[in-house]
Image (spheres, rainbow, N blue to C red):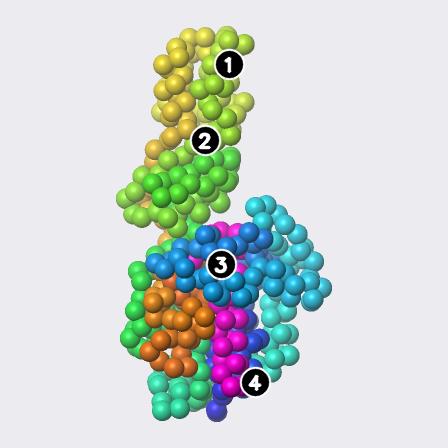
């Protein structure tokens, strides 16, 4: 069966690409339904973009690569598409936009846009081999237990990364990259909780508070959540993308106010209060109990010298911790690294060495922050590739 364009992967980037690539497009995916990561995202409401999305919110060996695609298809373009389909949405926090209803509305919107564009969709279809031909590509697949051969002038790698394997994620994008001699950058889990040995924070499981998490490269002020395995919450997930095995992190447990000034003021006003009582006004009680032996939280405020208060303040504002690891791809929201951007055109997402071969979305070494940024990259890169394919056909 001959097609103009074959897109491997019916995720966010692949479906978006199909809405722009023109007639003769086929999207294939091994899943039972399209857009499975869209469906589960944002607690089932899909954090589909971010009002503040800009190149500064992305990690890549080439931080400039994402600029072209994102300038030509912005968050406002996607919001316009959502509005056109009558999907109600709201801003939750920090520019994060969610559906009022269900993430399935975004999937249905993309499927409808694909149909309007004339693209076909095959689900439960597995790729068994990909080869290059004189006219493009030959792809062998298995669909409903039957082998089939597809040919296409253009081939788009939109199979994502390794994150959340239970959703069907595989390393197919990287296998194809190696097959076609495309360079890869190191891959690792991103937007992922930290783990600590010996169930260190198990007694605090479920405790949450606003915090500032930092390392030598960056800092994030968002919620921190203690879990049975370690640390999670938005501030942790964000920092994890900038963290490497064995590195120490810093946690500021009271980021809004200089702790020394706070405690010294209270010492003057309510010196007879127990130090733990005062701290429990600013921190969850279970956390104060947990920190009492580690930080030696004894006595009344009046008993604390300036030096003691300053030492305590430093520890509360710069609690040094070394994660033993992360929860890995099992719970990581994204994969850091991937197909090296040096191998691609930033304008079209086409490989520089193999005409007609494109890579989009998470498969590429462009990774966004938590909060809708990765979907915006999927939309922008998908549009860039799809538009380039359509333009070449019309030329």
Please name whichever residue, 63 or 142, is drawn nearer the observer in this view of the structure: 63
Find disc 1 in the rendering and name its residue: 265
**Of the residues under marks 3 and 4, which one precedes in the sequence?**
4
**Of the residues under marks 3 and 2, which one precedes in the sequence?**
2
Q: Residue at x 44, y 83 (%)?
A: 154
Instruction: State the separation of the CA atoms marked 3 and 2.
Output: 28 Å
Residue 324, percent from left and from top: 31, 43
Is 393 magenta? The answer is yes
Residue 61, percent from left and from top: 34, 58
Residue 34, percent from left and from top: 55, 71
Find disc 4 in the rendering and name its residue: 23
Instruction: State the separation of the CA atoms marked 2 and 1.
Output: 19 Å
Q: Which residues are magenta?
A: 366-395
Instruction: State the separation of the CA atoms marked 3 and 4.
Output: 27 Å
Q: Are marks 1 and 4 in contact (CB under 8 Å)?
A: no
Please name whichever residue, 296 or 25, is drawn nearer the observer in this view of the structure: 25
Residue 164, percent from left and from top: 44, 60
Q: Which mark is residue 374?
A: 3
């Amino acid at each position: 069966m001959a097609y103009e364009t074959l897109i491997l992967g019916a995720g966010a980037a692949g479906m978006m690409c199909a809405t722009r690539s023109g007639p003769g497009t086929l999207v294939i995916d091994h899943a039972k339904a399209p857009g499975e990561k869209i469906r589960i995202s944002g607690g089932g409401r899909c954090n589909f973009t971010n009002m503040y999305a800009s190149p500064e919110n992305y990690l890549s060996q080439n931080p400039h690569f994402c600029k072209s695609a994102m300038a030509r298809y912005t968050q406002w373009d996607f919001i316009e598409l959502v509005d056109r389909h009558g999907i109600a949405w709201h801003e939750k926090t920090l520019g994060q936009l969610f559906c009022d209803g269900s993430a399935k509305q975004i999937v249905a919107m993309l499927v409808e846009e694909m149909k309007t564009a004339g693209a076909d969709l095959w689900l439960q279809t597995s790729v068994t081999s990909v080869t290059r031909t004189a006219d493009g590509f030959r792809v062998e697949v298995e669909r409903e237990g039957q082998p089939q051969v597809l040919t296409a002038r253009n081939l788009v790698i939109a199979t994502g990364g390794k994150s959340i394997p239970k959703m069907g994620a595989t390393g197919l994008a990287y296998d194809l990259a190696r097959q076609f001699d495309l360079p890869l950058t190191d891959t690792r889990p991103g937007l992922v909780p930290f783990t600590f040995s010996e169930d260190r924070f198990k007694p605090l499981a479920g405790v949450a508070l606003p915090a500032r998490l930092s390392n030598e490269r960056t800092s994030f002020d968002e919620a921190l959540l203690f879990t049975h395995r370690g640390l999670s919450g938005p501030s942790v997930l964000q920092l994890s993308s900038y963290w490497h095995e064995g590195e120490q992190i810093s946690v500021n447990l009271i980021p809004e106010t200089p702790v020394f000034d706070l405690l010294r003021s209270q010492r003057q006003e309510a010196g007879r209060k127990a130090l733990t009582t005062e701290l429990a006004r600013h921190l969850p009680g279970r956390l104060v109990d947990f920190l009492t032996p580690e930080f030696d939280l004894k006595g009344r405020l009046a008993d604390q010298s300036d030096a003691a208060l300053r030492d305590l303040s430093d520890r509360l504002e710069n609690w040094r911790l070394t994660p033993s690891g992360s929860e890995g791809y099992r719970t990581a929201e994204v994969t850091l690294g991937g197909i090296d951007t040096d191998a691609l055109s930033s304008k079209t997402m086409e490989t520089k060495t193999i005409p007609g071969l494109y890579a989009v979305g998470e498969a590429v070494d462009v990774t966004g922050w938590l909060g809708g940024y990765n979907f915006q990259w999927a939309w922008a890169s998908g549009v860039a590739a799809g538009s380039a394919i359509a333009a070449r056909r019309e030329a």
